[in-house]
DNA sequence: TTTTCATGTAACTTACATTATTACATGATG
DNA sequence: CATCATGTAATAATGTAAGTTACATGAAAA
């Protein structure tokens, strides 16, 4: 199973964008993911439609955040991406005739549905500002480590 | 994202096996999934190592259950398959240098880890006998529908 | 003891989804 | 009007899982 990295990738990108505080081009943003600008545009298209970011064409154009980070939850970003598949496990047939297969699917369904609910609830409770705050903390710790070289770096 | 159907498939197969009450060949089992016998053997190999099923070579050989359905949980089957990926979303880099990406991954990690815990707990609480019981119920309802044709079939 | 049947696996091929790239249209700025 | 940037369709490249083939191993039947 190859994993889908869109959610993690786009979060990475827009937090850099927010940090930067001015318009950034797809090309610049693509550097963070070591990918092609078109890939950035494709992912950002959903966020633009959802009103999370704004794009401007032409000279001096690029992407900017449309809202403060406090006002954007992981849920918002996830939905803006088009709510990509969360689970890697699926069914061979969606609507099987076989009653055994129906019973199997029903059982798995209930387990996955509950997990999905919990996951989305959690996504709703985390804002981009929370992640940015965690980043700020990590940066502080990182700088502190650099300032006291007599202390061995943590593993 | 293409989904992995191993869990659903193997559950389907071994419930048929349990229902049948005698050894079944990979070839016969493959018919249920409309697939190749080798695919069955590959998936069953894990279950055999985990002691859930037994295989016998040669004439009259094939697969049989090694334990009663009551003694096998979804967890057991999931682990026997090699604990395949549950979530479709992953990270672009596992151990990124970028502190923003670290913060993003940490946030997603905590959400997914909680969901995974819940999912596995639920898997542990469902036995194959539970699914078989659900199947029995469905069969009863199905037969009842056939017996009373004046009643329109449910959608 | 030889043939047949079945599993056990490795190696290879095919199918397919995702990502990456190319190409070109649209629109804004200098 | 040249340049820069997004918007998007079309195509190519890539990677993974599923499917297939081939052959070894072992057990039962003839």
Image (spheres, coloured by chain):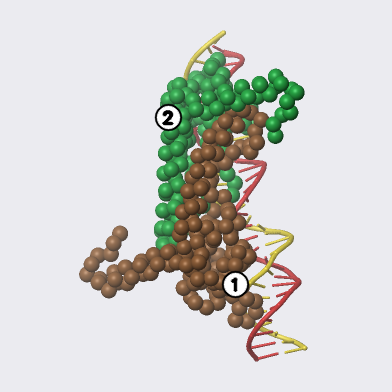
Chain colours: A green, B brown, C yellow, D red
Residue B75: percent from the left, percent from the top?
Answer: 52, 58
Residue at point 25% right, 72% down?
B148
Circle 2 residue: A50
Most foreground residue, B115 or B11 = B115
Task: Please tell me in which quadrant of the rendered image residue A96 appears.
Answer: bottom left
Give the number of callouts: 2
Residue at point 57% right, 50% down?
B85
Have a look at marks 2 and 1 and say if they share a chain.
no
Most foreground residue, A50 or C17 = A50
Q: Is residue A155 left or right of residue B109?
A: right
The image's mark for residue B80 is none
Circle 1 residue: B54
Give the CA distance from mark 2 to mark 1: 54 Å
Residue at point 22% right, 69% down?
B150
Q: Is residue A90 above or below residue A35?
A: below
Most foreground residue, A145 or C8 = A145
Q: Residue furthest front?
A: A151
**Is residue B152 visible to us here?**
yes
Q: Is residue B12 above or below residue B62?
A: above
Q: Is residue A136 above or below residue C5?
A: above
Residue at point 45% right, 59% down?
B126
Chain assignment, label 2: A
Chain assignment, label 1: B
Residue B15: percent from the left, percent from the top?
Answer: 48, 68
């Amino acid at each position: 199973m190859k994993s889908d990295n869109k959610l993690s990738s786009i979060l990475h990108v827009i937090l850099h964008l927010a940090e930067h505080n001015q318009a950034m081009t797809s090309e610049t943003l693509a550097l963070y993911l070591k990918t092609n600008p078109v890939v950035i545009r494709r992912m950002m298209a959903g966020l633009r439609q959802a009103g999370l970011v704004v794009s401007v064409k032409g000279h001096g154009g690029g992407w900017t955040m449309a809202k403060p980070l406090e006002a954007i939850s992981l849920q918002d970003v996830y939905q803006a991406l088009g709510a990509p598949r969360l689970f890697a496990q699926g069914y061979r047939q969606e609507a099987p005739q076989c009653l055994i297969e129906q019973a199997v699917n029903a059982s798995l369904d209930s387990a996955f549905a509950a997990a999905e609910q919990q996951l989305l609830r959690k996504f709703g409770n985390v804002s981009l500002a929370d992640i940015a705050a965690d980043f700020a903390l990590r940066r502080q710790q990182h700088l502190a480590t650099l300032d006291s070289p007599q202390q061995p770096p943590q593993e």
